[in-house]
Amino acid sequence: MNRPSLLFLTDLNNGAEQEDILIADFLRRDFEVLVRHPSDSESLEKSVEAIIIRNVWNDTTYGKPEPWYARWRVHPDLPIHDDLYMREGEYKDYLLKLYADGFPVIPTIDTVRAIDELPESETYFIKPKDGFDAIDTHVLSREELLAMNPEHHLIQPFVDFEYEISFYYLDKKLQYVLHAPDKTERWRLEPFKPAEDDIRFAERFVRWNRQRRGIERIDACRLKDGSLQLMEITDQGGVYLSIPTLPEEMRLLFLGNLSDSLQALVAFRTGTQAG
């Protein structure tokens, strides 16, 4: 029996290629896997039975969308979330919306004219709306922030938190939770057993996110009082999963669930699902 074809979109020059090599190798048990960068995949997109977007983080060059990124907005397998990637906004504008709507998010504005809407703080953290991996982020005093008057950046009070925690979901189902016990080493993550309140926190954002299928990562920080505040939601092509460092049982369980999800997608699209 022929295995279904799967187009695996990733950037194997992103410094984290080991993760996607491991995932692609696992999926070859059930799929004919074609690995491509999105800039070199257009001719294949209509000939495969499923597409998965993996670690493709830098989808802009100097603030302008890459030519291939526009295809993600119209391809039936690649739905872009209108809240997370607003067509008339910028990538991280959803944090502004969530904060304004009263969600437990680190207080966030995008103009110094609104600085009085933030809790009083000695220092402020700014990050580009189209940035990733803490590139071009800064901690500034109020005076430095006002003098810089940044554009296309989010502005937040600098939060003194205990640690970061990430919740990993697949098709709206929690898969595992990791945390960084040392907040100075964001990606030295360890398995974490969340409390029920922690899961309820994460699932507020999972329910809010209208993405129906695929991977989501809810990143939060634990404050000194024990509560959580959202840092970011990552879905679509930017979800690093820490696959190489997961315990084997956890890794294999997740990868099996991912394969099952993709097979269900293929069955739905081809009309071969059971029943």
Image (cartoon, helix red, strand yellow):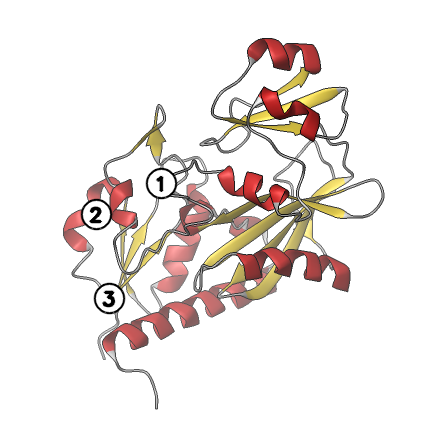
**Is any part of residue 251 visible from this angle?**
no
Circle 1 sits on which residue? 12
Mark 3 or mark 1: which comes first in sequence? 1
Whether residue 218 sits left or right of residue 257 in the image: it is: right
Label 2 element class:
loop
Label 1 element class:
loop
Mark 1 or mark 2: which comes first in sequence? 1
Which numbered circle lies on residue 49? Answer: 3
Whether residue 231 sits left or right of residue 62 in the image: it is: right
How dense is the environment of label 2, judged by Cα within 10 Å: few (below 14), some, or many (20 and up)?
A: some
Between the C-alphas of marks 3 and 1, the distance is 22 Å
Q: Identify residue type, mark 2.
A: Ser
Foreground: disc 3 or disc 1: 3
> What residue do we see at 63% from left, 58% from top?
204
Q: Identify residue type, mark 3.
A: Glu
Question: In terms of depth relative to the viewer, which is nearer, 99 or 60?
Answer: 99
Q: Position of residue 61 (x, y in %)?
A: 33, 27
Which numbered circle lies on residue 118? Answer: none
Q: Position of residue 98 (x, y in %)?
A: 59, 46
Foreground: disc 1 or disc 2: 2
Whether residue 55 sits left or right of residue 109 in the image: it is: left
* Quarter occupied by residue 162: top right
- Does residue 15 lie above or below 121 as drawn? below
Question: In terms of depth relative to the viewer, which is nearer, 50 or 232?
Answer: 232
Q: Position of residue 15 (x, y in %)?
A: 44, 35
Circle 2 sits on which residue? 41
> What residue do we see at 62% from left, 25% from top?
114
Give yes or no for contact between labels 2 and 3 (Cβ–Cβ under 8 Å).
no
Give yes or no for contact between labels 3 and 1 (Cβ–Cβ under 8 Å).
no
